[in-house]
Image: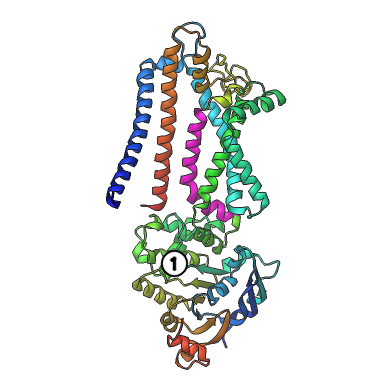
């Protein structure tokens, strides 16, 4: 075989692998959507789940998923921004920085079920938060923080050093340079990373089973006082999310239409996660184009 | 006798143990263009960056000597570096506009200094871009991204950005070496226009550029200041053998 033939063979193999991956993804998505979409209706999306009879929906779980996501992002974004800025802009190359970096790597490689159990021991039991949105959001923060921090650090590092010099030479302080020059320029990457992280968090189940709980008490959507137990905004109520609901139904569901509810919920979950991915790409590119005018 | 804006005596700079500048005495007159020439690695850019303390960013750098902007010791512990850099602006080799509109680039320093008044900002943009000889090319697209401009235009926007904060001294670190000849000429002509209002110090690789625009020239070699004189004198009758060899292209 000569070099040209080898090249052709390699191209063919790589091409096949790529097609295979796309096919697997497409068939998986297709299967879930074909199975699930027929069960999705406005009623299904808005009504509460039923434990023993058919006709339950996923309204509360859907709301819980978004609310939990919002809270988790509210906690993790500021912390990871701080950590990312520190690591990219201020940290000196020394032992302390090495230790921080290693800690972040270890944290990011922890299995989510372990993070969930940690959350259970610390937030649920030790801090007496109980099975609650707050415990869930904190567990998700543990899960999300390392990835988000890494993403922000990488995005900041990709900004050309010349831009920092430009800011400093213009009489900006180091902090002003970071805030007014470096972060705006890194923003497309940061936003993309945040939305992708949101998608990951949205589909997470294992970290939530023992923290946010497996029950979704009825909510009164007319009560917006966060201190009332039936209020959707209450952060101390247990909150089963969509992903946990799917796991629950499949492991111990006794509704006659459990299979249908599971399929429908899976389709909704997949669609939401897909939406996050598309949104991340779209927003990232839009921002980038707006800034570079290309 | 012209006023001296920047004076420096016995400037040494060390990168770790390596002595990159070995005792430089150099003064800069008000409203003159001083060119610094020399082969790569001779220390001319390093010296330039001393004047607005851009070397502070590099770990392991040690600087000694007496360097003053008017009466103020640039390296005194109580020197406000941010305020210093407002008085001593800098233009870099690679055009480095911010990824914002042309307008926002130019008013950046002013906005951060707290200027909010629209008319003041508008006026500053027009004046600075006119001074930087780019107003006619961009006046109809001030709100387009500065990154959509050509390299030469970007560099002039960067100069306008420095001019807008009204520094006293402008440092230029090989500002035309990444540009085409036409853009380079435009920038040279602009610098000649600016000479009446600013003190300009330019590092250049291009000896012809130095001879065309500068009043004084400093020739650096291996961390030493070999010769410093009126540009005309130096190019016609260099005092040192090394200067003569360099100017006649025998090395470098």
Image quarter (top left, top right, bottom left or bottom right) of the N terminus of chain B: bottom right
Residue denoted by label 1: B127
Q: How many labels, in total?
A: 1
Q: Which residues are magenta?
A: A175-203
Where, by quadrant of the figure, is residue B70 drawn? Answer: bottom right
Is residue A79 something that shows in the picture? no
Q: Is residue B69 magenta?
A: no
Residue A174 against residue A225 in the figure, above or below: below
Residue B79 image offset from top left, x and y in percent: 67, 67
Colour mapping used in the image:
rainbow
B55 displayed left or right of A196: right
Residue B130 image offset from top left, x and y in percent: 41, 68
Residue A205 image offset from top left, x and y in percent: 53, 24
Query: Callout 1: few (<14), some (14-19), or many (20+) C-alpha neighbours within 10 Å?
Result: some
Where, by quadrant of the figure, is residue A145 drawn? Answer: top right
Near-viewer residue (B40 or A230): B40
Residue A27 against residue B91 in the figure, above or below: above
Residue B5 against residue A241 in the figure, above or below: below
A221 displayed left or right of B18: left
A175 displayed left or right of B163: right
Near-viewer residue (A35 or B150): A35
Q: Is residue A188 magenta?
A: yes
Near-viewer residue (A120 or B165): A120
Is residue B208 something that shows in the picture? yes
Residue A127 image offset from top left, x and y in percent: 71, 26
A259 displayed left or right of A204: left
Residue at left offset 63%, top offset 55%: A93
Numbered disc 1: secondary structure? helix
Q: Which chain is home to disc 1? A: B
């Amino acid at each position: 075989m000569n070099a040209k033939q080898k090249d052709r063979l390699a191209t063919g193999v790589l091409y096949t692998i790529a097609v295979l991956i796309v096919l697997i993804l497409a068939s998986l998505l297709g299967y879930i959507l074909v199975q699930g979409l027929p069960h999705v209706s406005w009623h299904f999306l808005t009504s509460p789940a039923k434990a023993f009879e058919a006709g339950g929906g996923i309204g509360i779980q859907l709301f819980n998923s978004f609310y939990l996501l919002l809270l988790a992002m509210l906690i993790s974004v500021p912390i990871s921004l701080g950590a990312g800025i520190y690591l990219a802009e201020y940290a000196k190359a020394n032992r302390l920085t090495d230790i921080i970096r290693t800690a972040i790597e270890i944290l990011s490689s922890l299995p989510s079920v372990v993070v969930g159990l940690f959350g259970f021991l610390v937030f649920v039991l030790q801090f007496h938060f109980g099975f609650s949105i707050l415990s869930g959001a904190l567990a998700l923060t543990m899960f999300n923080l390392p990835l988000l921090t890494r993403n922000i650090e990488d995005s900041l590092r990709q900004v050309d050093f010349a831009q920092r010099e430009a800011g400093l030479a213009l009489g900006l302080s180091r902090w002003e340079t970071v805030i007014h020059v470096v972060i705006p320029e890194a923003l497309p990457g940061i936003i993309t990373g945040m939305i992708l992280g949101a998608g990951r968090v949205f589909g997470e189940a294992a970290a939530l089973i023992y923290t946010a709980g497996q029950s979704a008490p009825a909510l009164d959507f007319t009560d917006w006082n966060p201190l009332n137990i039936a209020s959707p905004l209450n952060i101390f109520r247990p909150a089963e999310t969509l992903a946990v609901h799917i796991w629950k139904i499949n492991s111990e569901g006794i509704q006659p239409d459990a299979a249908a509810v599971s399929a429908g919920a899976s389709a909704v979950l997949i669609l939401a996660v897909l939406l996050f991915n598309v949104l991340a790409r779209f927003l990232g590119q839009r921002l980038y184009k707006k800034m570079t005018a290309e | 006798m012209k006023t001296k804006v920047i004076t420096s005596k016995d400037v040494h700079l060390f990168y770790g143990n390596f002595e990159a500048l070995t005792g430089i005495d150099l003064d800069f007159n008000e409203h003159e263009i001083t060119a610094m020439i020399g082969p790569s690695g001779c220390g001319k850019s390093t010296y330039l960056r001393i004047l607005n303390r851009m070397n502070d960013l590099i770990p392991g750098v040690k600087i000694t000597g007496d360097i003053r902007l008017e009466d103020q010791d640039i390296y005194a512990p109580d020197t406000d570096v941010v305020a210093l850099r407002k008085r001593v602006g800098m233009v870099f080799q690679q055009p480095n506009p911010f990824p914002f509109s042309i307008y926002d680039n130019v008013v950046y320093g002013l906005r951060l200094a707290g200027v909010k008044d629209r008319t003041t900002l508008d006026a500053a943009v027009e004046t600075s871009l006119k001074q930087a000889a780019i107003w006619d090319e961009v006046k109809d697209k001030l709100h387009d991204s500065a990154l959509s401009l050509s390299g030469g235009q970007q560099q002039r926007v960067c100069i306008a950005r420095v001019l807008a904060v009204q520094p006293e001294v402008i440092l230029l670190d090989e500002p035309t070496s990444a540009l085409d000849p036409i853009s380079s000429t435009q920038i040279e002509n602009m610098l000649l226009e600016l000479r009446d209002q600013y003190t300009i110090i330019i590092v250049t690789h291009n000896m012809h550029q130095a001879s065309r625009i500068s009043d004084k020239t400093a020739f650096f070699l291996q961390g030493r200041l070999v010769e410093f004189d009126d540009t005309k004198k130096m190019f016609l009758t260099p005092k040192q053998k090394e200067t003569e060899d360099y100017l006649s292209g025998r090395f470098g």
